[in-house]
Image (spheres, rainbow, N blue to C red):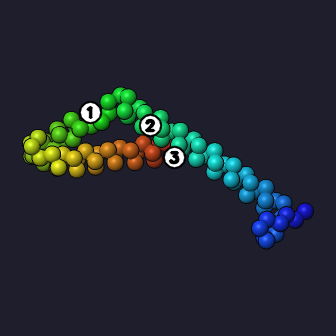
Amino acid sequence: MVLCTSLTFVDEETFRKANAYGRDKSTFGFVNGAFSTAQTLAVLHFGFMPWLWAQSGRLMTRYLGYGDEYEITRSCVFITLYSVIMAVSEFQAVAN
């Protein structure tokens, strides 16, 4: 059987494969969104941001030699740490 979809003829097997792919893609999007939401809620609930801010200050003082008055430098360290941690956690979610 040949199906006509928007002026393109597709055999039944290709149509079924495309449908299965669309369903899988939709399911993956839902799971990915749920994981991202859960991750954000956990970060906010457990006070990860204030803890990471304090850690960035300690790292900045220890390794860069700057004090607390260098807020822009501390913000850069904070954003770098946060970005690396979030990238690693997303990579772990995809790898499993």
| Mark 2, secondary structure of its residue | helix
Which label sits in the foreground, 1 or 3?
Answer: 1
> Which comes before the other along the chain, label 2 or label 1?
2
**Residue at numbered disc 2:** 39
Q: Judge left or right: residue 56 versus residue 27.
A: left
| Mark 3, secondary structure of its residue | helix
Give me the residue at 11% from left, 40% from top. Answer: 68
**Residue at numbered disc 3:** 94
**Residue at numbered disc 1:** 51
Q: Position of residue 29 (x, y in %)?
A: 58, 47
4 lies above or below 27: below
| Alpha carbons under labels 2 and 1: distance apart | 16 Å
**Which is nearer the eye, 1 or 8?**
8
Residue 31 sits in quarter: top right
Name which residue type carries label 2: Gln
Give me the residue at 26% from left, 33% from top. Answer: 51
| Mark 1, secondary structure of its residue | helix
Q: Does the CB distance between marks 1 and 3 fall below 8 Å?
A: no
| Alpha carbons under labels 2 and 3: distance apart | 14 Å
| Residue at the farthest right position | 1
